[in-house]
Image (cartoon, rainbow, N blue to C red):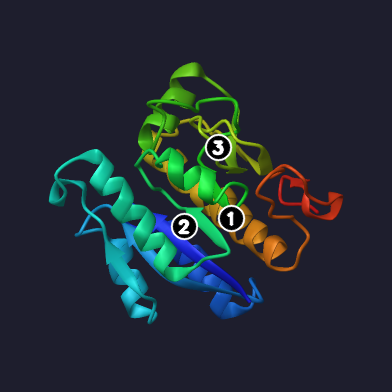
Amino acid sequence: MLKIVTLVSGGGTNLQAIIDAIENGGIKNAQIVKVISNKADAYALERAAKHGIAAQAVVKKEFPDREAFNDALIAAVDEAAPDLVVLAGFLVVLPVKMIEKYRGRIINIHPSLIPSFCGNGFYGLKVHEAALARGVKVTGATVHFVDEGTDTGPIIAQKAVEVKEGDTPEILQRRVMEQAEWVILPGVINDIAHGRIKLSRSHPEERSDEGSYYGGEK
């Protein structure tokens, strides 16, 4: 059974997609053992509680400095002894010590087709605002392994989404979530749970052809 810790900063829609997929059989041989947020009022924590999942807030302002916060965050993750750490809208730069400790076992969902509209400053609605300002006809979402950079780790899966006439950032965000994020993130987790995508400390990019896919088609 793949043990998952999910880190979330906000509402937790991607968390809900994972929970739903586990409960309806879309993800098998996996369970979320803990949800951690850097915000005490994050709705993601309520989502976890409603489904009987352990939830914890680790809030930066409650610690004397960033190092103490980082240590507390790592300790909160360690306590659950996860096989996989999933960043599902976690707006905190991970401590280098945590990346080193869980190298090849941390994945992130980003609401664009990396390398477009990613890196520092690109998160939430800002990604979709940038896509619309650039005038692209296609956007999407990416699941990737996490390294020390921002959205720079090896890509695992991507799914394209059409940009339509009259889209606002909010409308585009919703379409990307529904058509891409909520599809590929559970899909990747299910592939990891079944060994089709390999978790490795030293070579996170190593994965079988069966588990590597684009556009949601294996």
Res 96 → quadrant: top left
Q: Which residue is mark 1?
A: 185
Image quadrant containing the N terminus: bottom right
Image quadrant containing the C terminus: bottom right
Query: Which amino acid is tagged 3?
Result: Asp
Q: Could you say where residue 182 lies in the image, as x and y percent from the top left? A: 55, 56
Q: Which residue is mark 2?
A: 14
Circle 3 or circle 1, nearest the eye: 3
Image disc number at residue 147:
3
Specify which label sits upstream in the sequence, 2 or 1. Answer: 2
Say which element carries label 2.
helix
Q: Residue furthest top?
A: 134
Res 25 → quadrant: bottom right
Say which element carries label 1.
helix
In the rendered image of this protein, does residue 39 appear above or below residue 125?
below
Q: Is residue 69 in sight in this rendering? A: yes
Q: CA distance from mark 3 to mark 2?
A: 21 Å
In the rendered image of this protein, does residue 31 appear above or below residue 145?
below
Circle 3 or circle 2, nearest the eye: 3
Q: CA distance from mark 3 to mark 1?
A: 18 Å
Q: Is residue 127 left or right of residue 71?
A: right
Query: Which amino acid is tagged 2?
Result: Asn
**What residue lies at 32% left-to-right and 76% top-to-bottom?**
49
